[in-house]
Image: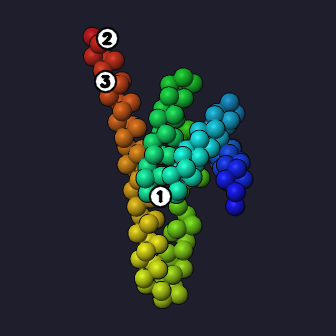
């Protein structure tokens, strides 16, 4: 599938998930654009573990910024924007290989999938910590 079709599908998926979780309507296009930008980074980095990390870092930071500008929680944006990056196909293939008895492919695919999930979790943690530190510094300056 060509990269531009993947980006359009990513945008539509983020919009659909935004509607599914009942985000405010003004957040739909923002969430879609953030998800598309993150997925673009993921594609540029050849869908690797580092791709998961940097794409999610971009999504996390962008969602934190938008949350402050629109006075909502960052989780609200992150939930919909991260959906296109979740390695569901890797989980499915890992289970399929296990059922078929192909242990070497199951281990290989499972390892890639778990590393992708770890990259996502680490990047979300880093983006949250960055903004938590900015908030605590701002509070210290005010006192």
Q: Nearer the viewer, mark 2 or mark 1?
A: 1
Whichever of callouts 3 and 1 sits on the residue coming sooner in the sequence is: 1
Label whose residue precedes the other's in the sequence (3 or 2): 3
Where in the figure is residue 40, as x and y percent of width and height?
59, 46
Q: Which residue is mark 1?
A: 48
Residue visible at 47% across and 72% down in the picture: 109
Q: Nearer the viewer, mark 3 or mark 1?
A: 1
Q: Nearer the viewer, residue 55 or 130?
A: 55
Which mark, residue 139? Answer: none
| Residue 20 visible somewhere in the drawing | no
Q: Quadrant of the N terminus?
A: bottom right
Q: Quadrant of residue 110?
A: bottom left
Q: Is residue 4 left or right of residue 67?
A: right
* Camera-side residue of 53 and 31: 53
Sort mark 3 into few (<14), some (14-19) or many (20+) by Cα contacts within 10 Å.
Answer: few
Quote the CA–CA distance across marks 3 and 1. 34 Å
Q: Secondary structure at mark 2?
A: helix
- Using a 10 Å C-alpha cutoff, classify the residue at mark 1 as few (fewer than 14 neighbours), some (14 to 19) or many (20 or more): some
Spot the residue most to the top.
143
Q: Which residue is mark 3?
A: 136
- Residue 43 placed where, x, y %? 57, 52
Residue at 43% in and 57% down: 49
Considering every residue shown, the one lying at the far bottom of the view is 101
Q: Nearer the viewer, residue 92 or 48?
A: 48
The location of residue 80, given as percent across then percent down, is: 59, 45
Residue occupying image coordinates x 41% and y 45%: 123
Alpha carbon separation for disc pair 3 and 2 = 10 Å
Q: Quadrant of the C terminus?
A: top left
- Counting residues from the N terminus, which is met first, the one under dot 2 or under dot 1? 1
Q: Disc 2 and disc 1: Cα gap in Å?
A: 42 Å
């Amino acid at each position: 599938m060509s990269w531009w079709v993947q980006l359009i599908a990513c945008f539509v998926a983020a919009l659909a998930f935004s509607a599914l979780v009942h985000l405010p309507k003004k957040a739909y296009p923002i969430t879609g654009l953030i998800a598309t930008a993150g997925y673009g980074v993921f594609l540029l980095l050849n869908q690797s573990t580092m791709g998961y990390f940097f794409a999610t870092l971009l999504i996390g930071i962008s969602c934190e910024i938008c949350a402050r500008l629109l006075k909502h929680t960052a989780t609200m944006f992150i939930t919909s924007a991260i959906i296109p990056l979740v390695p569901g196909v890797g989980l499915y293939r890992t289970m399929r290989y296990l059922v078929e008895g192909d242990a070497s492919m199951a281990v290989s695919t499972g390892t890639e999938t778990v590393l992708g999930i770890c990259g996502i979790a680490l990047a979300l943690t880093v983006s949250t910590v960055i903004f938590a530190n900015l908030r605590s510094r701002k509070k210290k300056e005010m006192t």
